[in-house]
Amino acid sequence: MTSTEQDRPAVALHDVGKRFPGVVAVSGVTLAIPPGEVHVFAGENGAGKSTLMKLIAQVEQPSSGRIELDGVPVAYQGPGAARRLGVVMVHQEFALAPDLSVAENLFIGHEPGRGGWISRAEERRAARELLGHVGLDIDPGRRVALLSTAEQQRVELAKALTVQAKVLILDEPTASLTEREAEELFGIVRELTARGIAVLYISHRLDEIFEIGDRVTVMRDGAVVATRPVTELDEDRLVQLMVGRDVENLYPRTHNKPGPVRLEVRGLTRDDAVRDVSFEVRAGEIVGLAGLVGAGRTELARAVFGAELPDAGTIALDGKRLRIRGPSDAIAAGIGYLTESRKTDGLALPLGVDKNITLAKLPMRAGLIDLAAERKIAERERDGLRIRVPWVGRPVRTLSGGNQQKVILARWLETGAEVLFFDEPGRGMDVGAKSEMFQQMDSLAARGKAVVFISSYLPELLNMCDRILVMRGGRITGEVARAEFSEERVVALATGARNVENGGNHD
Ligand SMILES: Nc1ncnc2c1ncn2[C@@H]1O[C@H](COP(=O)(O)OP(=O)(O)OP(=O)(O)O)[C@@H](O)[C@H]1O
Ligand SMILES: [Mg+2]
């Protein structure tokens, strides 16, 4: 490719590599991304996507190779320097200071007032204008801690606009957004690309890759497998490139005849979040919980698990009423809960993969932790879920995002819980890992456990569940049996659309 003024790439990588002790995270990446392109990075968990982005944003120093911005080679000088050159990275865990105001967060390091003197009024005015560009109508004096996830992300995007951004990096930006928030984000991304900003976008969601991407680079084991315009790919081909094989059946489910009732919840109530909820789950069943974000699904799971104490209601397991005063009671009784916010709720980051997996149920021998057994358990889970880690004693902190999630999943699989709540378990996992996770859910059910599956992605529920309970405003507003499964029916119940009761019945 010749480079004239206008087709000079916003970012160019030449044989870029990054080694960590014992791991080659990125190797031999050569790639050029023009201004105004949305370039998607896809690949299995641990493929090196986040690390590559950190090299471009100078969060990490490359071990080899050369990076050019606008045709000029850049030396590694840290994230501040990269920002000044117009590279902005929105990390998956946002880097905002929670106790500062929105305006303060926007202008940290480069306050609008000249000569070291900051005018509050000026700062606020500038903040409002920037927030307007990302469709956020909030008081710039508001503390960041009080904002929703989507709002915090918007502030991050607005922050990108405070510098003359040329390259914007988004690492799994829709992972914790609702469908509508995701659509709004796409709108903002399109506006930014129209202004000539190159957007580097990491995603595991096939649907959005095709919606927002111009080109896709697929990575595997740190290297680039292929770079293609999205128009030359379809989902099957993309999956094949990512995992290096066909994923025959993403949703492996064998429907067994449900056994006796295992979990029975009656009249469960907590504030306005959970209102008079009753349901049961039988042995061998996977019961889905559908609903819009905020419908009360997570709150319901937390109330059953004892993470929040209910105001009223009863919970019984195998016909025996339980007294749950906290999560440890729930665990002791045989109830497990894979939370949706795994980063904050679950992992001991400095500890090894092995310790993290056995945290809820330590293998003991003669009063001591059985270390050999612990390693065996961890190795079995590592192989089963394909957790990408050179040895199981390695701190969880050094694992990629998706692999950290697999560690928590492994922990719950190992507790031997009789009832398991999975709250958005597939988030951030690659397709291959997801299919393995679903296989495990299926086998839990086949062994007579009771599974409750919360997901905002309806195809997952429709393919994996025996029944779907739909929640709205803290209540269960309907139940859909497998024979009547349809996206329309679930959506209608979740949003409260009227005409569904007779309209959705096809047989
Ligand atoms: N600070 C670190 N120390 C040691 N190893 C690391 C570190 N950061 C990343 N790695 C390793 O580098 C490899 C690539 O990780 P990376 O986070 O780039 O993957 P990813 O493609 O973003 O995966 P995911 O989809 O799970 O987020 C992994 O094997 C990971 O364990
Ligand atoms: Mg990552």
Image: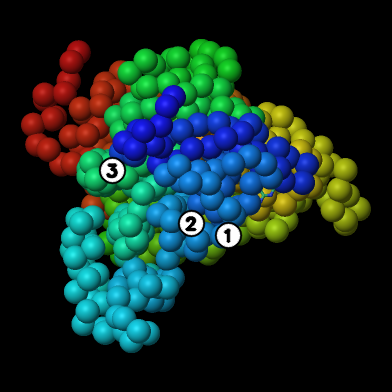
Q: Is residue 257 visible?
A: no
> Mark 3 belongs to which amino acid?
Gly
Is tag 2's residue or tag 1's residue first in the polypeptide sequence? 1
Residue 395 vs 505, above or below: the answer is below
Rendered position, 407 above or below 503: below
The residue beneath circle 1 is 77
At x 56% / y 47%, what residue is drawn? 55
Q: Residues under labels 2 and 1: Cα distance?
A: 7 Å
Image position, residue 152 (x, y; %): 34, 60
Mark 1, Cα crowd under 10 Å, few <14 / some 14-19 / many 20+, is few
Q: Is residue 20 left or right of residue 157?
A: right
Residue 427's label in the rendered image is none
Query: Are the residues at dot 2 and dot 3 in contact (C-beta closer than 8 Å)?
Result: no
At a point 59% along the width and 41% down the height, the residue shown is 66
Question: Which residue is at the front of the view, 136 or 72?
Answer: 72
- Mark count: 3
Kindly identify which residue carries mark 2: 82
Q: For numbered disc 1, what is the local secondary structure?
A: loop
In the image, taking residue 290 as reference, residue 49 lies left or right, namely: right
Q: Position of residue 100 (x, y in %)?
A: 38, 76
Quadrant, the C terminus: top left
